[in-house]
Amino acid sequence: MVDSKVEQPPAVLDIHDMTVAYNRRPVLWNIDLTLRDPGLIAIVGPNGAGKSTMIRAVMGLVPMVGGDVTAWGNSINRERHRIGYVPQRGSVDWDFPISVFETVLMGTFGSLGWFRRPGRKQRELTMQCLERVGMQDFAKRQIGQLSGGQQQRVFLARALAQEAELYFMDEPMAGVDAATERIVFELLKSLSDEGRTIVVVHHDLRSVSEYFDEVVLLNVRVVASGPVETTMTDANLQATYGGRLTILDRMAEAVQRQVETE
Ligand SMILES: Nc1ncnc2c1ncn2[C@@H]1O[C@H](COP(=O)(O)OP(=O)(O)OP(=O)(O)O)[C@@H](O)[C@H]1O
């Protein structure tokens, strides 16, 4: 029983009754989700389930039809400066003429305030972040001249430079090789060990239990959410993905997809 006299600290993120529609067609319906503790949280669901839309709506990039979102007990708009976002690689214009260094430096702008230019502190932080993702030697390179995995690492470095407490990342592992995937996850783990909350749209069901503390199973609605072991049940996966698929089928499918991309 919960003792009502013991006050709980406000949740890191609280989504209440969120509905999002494109052209009047709802793609997310009455989403309720509370993330109380820091850690690594995967959002999992089939193609078109609304995973990207959910984090884009939380970031204020897509309007909500209804509902509200708070972070640390305040309106999310008031807390934007504490929140970082790593978009899907495919949604970015990589031909934009900007160097790796400048891209990461932009991550520090949020802490600068209006009209202030980045100084030595921000430049040093930028280099440190590039070193953390092993991209320091590419600082002067244009972002369009990087491989997919390198672009992904630069985006992570930019997120690190934000020094946010809550991150939303849209498939940071998409199209990267196994070595880069490891680097990315080690980085995410170290962020969560520092007490941050990282919400990741993730496709590979095989690695959910290996990497994540909690999982949100999404398909237009939140089917289930909570600790990975108790949430990734066959029944919940069937409810999320439909059909008769069990976790073993999903794993086999994921393995097959991996083989095809290699
Ligand atoms: N800008 C848009 N205009 C209209 N419909 C959209 C738009 N963006 C997404 N949708 C639709 O909204 C639904 C949810 O899309 P979303 O990209 O959020 O799904 P997802 O779970 O991230 O999918 P995936 O795993 O394929 O990346 C899909 O049916 C998609 O076609």
Image (tube, helix red, strand yellow):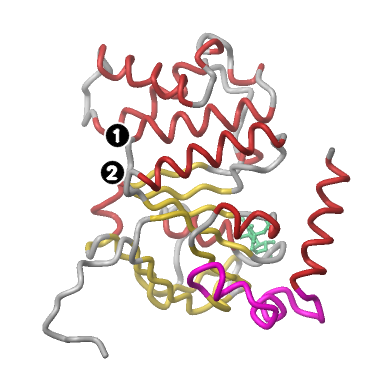
Q: Amino acid at mark 1?
A: Gly
Q: Quadrant of the N terminus?
A: bottom left
Decide if residue 48 is on the left or right side of residue 8: right
Residue at 56% x, 52% y: name it.
211
Q: Across the whole image, how many numbered discs are drawn on residues?
A: 2
Does residue 134 belong to the magenta stretch?
A: no
SS class of the residue under badge 2? helix
Decide if residue 206 is on the left or right side of residue 9: right
Does residue 230 belong to the magenta stretch?
A: yes
Q: Quadrant of residue 239?
A: bottom right
Using the image, determine if residue 7 lies above or below residue 3.
above
- Residue wearing tag 2: 81
Q: Are the two marked residues, 1 and 2, in contact with CB atoms closer than 8 angstroms?
A: yes
Pinpoint residue 50: horizontal percent, then vertical percent.
60, 64
Please state the extent of the stretch shown in magenta in the rendering: 225-246
Q: Amino acid at mark 2?
A: His
SS class of the residue under badge 1? helix
- Residue wearing tag 1: 110
Pinpoint residue 179: horizontal percent, then vertical percent.
67, 32
Pinpoint residue 215: horizontal percent, then vertical percent.
54, 65
Sequence-earlier tag: 1 or 2? 2
Pinpoint residue 236: horizontal percent, then vertical percent.
64, 79
Where on the image, by quarter, is ligand 1? bottom right
Task: Estimate how packed mark 2 is, as few (under 14), some (14 to 19) or many (20 or more) residues with alpha carbons within 10 Å.
Answer: some
